[in-house]
Amino acid sequence: RAVVVAQGYMPSLRDADRTIDFLEKQGITEISVLINSMRPEFVEKGIMQNADYILDVLGTSLLGIIPEDFKLLGSASEKKIAVLDEEAISKEAFLNTARRILGESVPIAEFNQEKNKKKKKRFFMWRRNK
C-alpha cells in the first residue's frame, strides 16, 4: 500500500500524478491520496483544486484531508508534537487519518468545496478512470 501526499495546487498534482504512475509501474496498486494544507477559501477562489477534482484526475481513493494549520509552523519550530496541541485545527484530521490507516472507518471532514469550473484546466485528460 502507498500513500501519496499532495496539495491542491496544479504543480503538486502533476508531481503526484507522476508518483502514482511510478508506483503502479512498480506493481503497487493500492494507492490513496492524502490532501495536505487544504484551504477552503483558496478552493472557492479557484487558486486550489477541490478534493473531488483531485481524486478525479489522480484516479485514487482519498485517505484524508488535512486543513492548512498555521499552528503547525509554531509546533515544528518549538519541537512540539502537533497532534497533542489542543489549539491545532488539524489535530482531528491527523488523528482520523491515522485511524483510517489502521483500518477504522472514520468519516472525512467536509470542506466548502464549491467547484470553480471557469478556472480549471484539465491537463490530465489522458488519466485512466479507476
Image (cartoon, grey):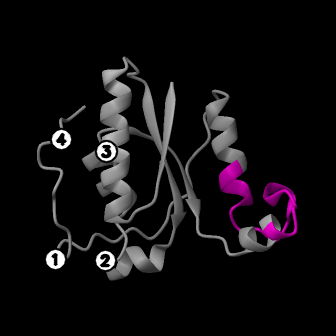
* Number of dots carrying numbers: 4
Would you identify the image quadrant in which residue 26 lies? top left
Given the image, on which type of amino acid does mark 2 rest? Answer: Gly
Q: Residues within 10 Å of mark 2 (few under 14, many from 20)?
A: some
Q: Is residue 66 left or right of residue 70?
A: left
* Label 1 SS: loop
Identify the amino acid type marked 1: Lys
Q: Could you tell me the amino acid type at mark 3?
A: Asp
Q: In whole angstroms, how far apart are the C-alphas of marks 2 and 3? A: 20 Å
Q: Dot 4 lies on which element?
A: loop
Q: Do labels 3 and 4 touch, CB within 8 Å?
A: yes
Q: Nearer the viewer, residue 18 or 52?
A: 18
Which residue is pictured at 41% across the width and 21% down the height? 28
- The residue at which mark 3 appears reads as 17
Q: Going 16% across and 77% down the picture, which residue do you hit?
A: 118
Cβ–Cβ under 8 Å for marks 1 and 2: yes
Q: Is residue 22 above or below residue 72?
A: above
Which label's residue is closer to the chain start, 2 or 3?
3
Q: Residue at x 34, y 62 (%)?
A: 11
Q: In the image, which is nearer the foreground, mark 1 or mark 4?
A: 4
- Disc 3 versus disc 1: distance between alpha carbons? 22 Å
Question: Which residue is label 4 attached to?
Answer: 127
**Residue 52 visible (yes or no):** no
Looking at the image, do the residues carrying marks 2 and 4 touch, with CB atoms under 8 Å apart? no
Mark 4, Cα crowd under 10 Å, few <14 / some 14-19 / many 20+, is some
Q: Could you tell me if residue 5 is visible in this image?
A: yes
Disc 1 crowd, CA 10 A, few/some/many (<14, 14-19, 20+): few
- Residue picked out by circle 2: 46
* Along the line of sight, the residue nearer the viewer: 120 or 13: 13
Of labels 3 and 4, the one closer to you? 3
Badge 3 or badge 1: first in the primary sequence: 3
The crowding category of the residue bearing disc 3, from other C-alpha atoms within 10 Å (few below 14, some 14 to 19, many at least 20), is: many
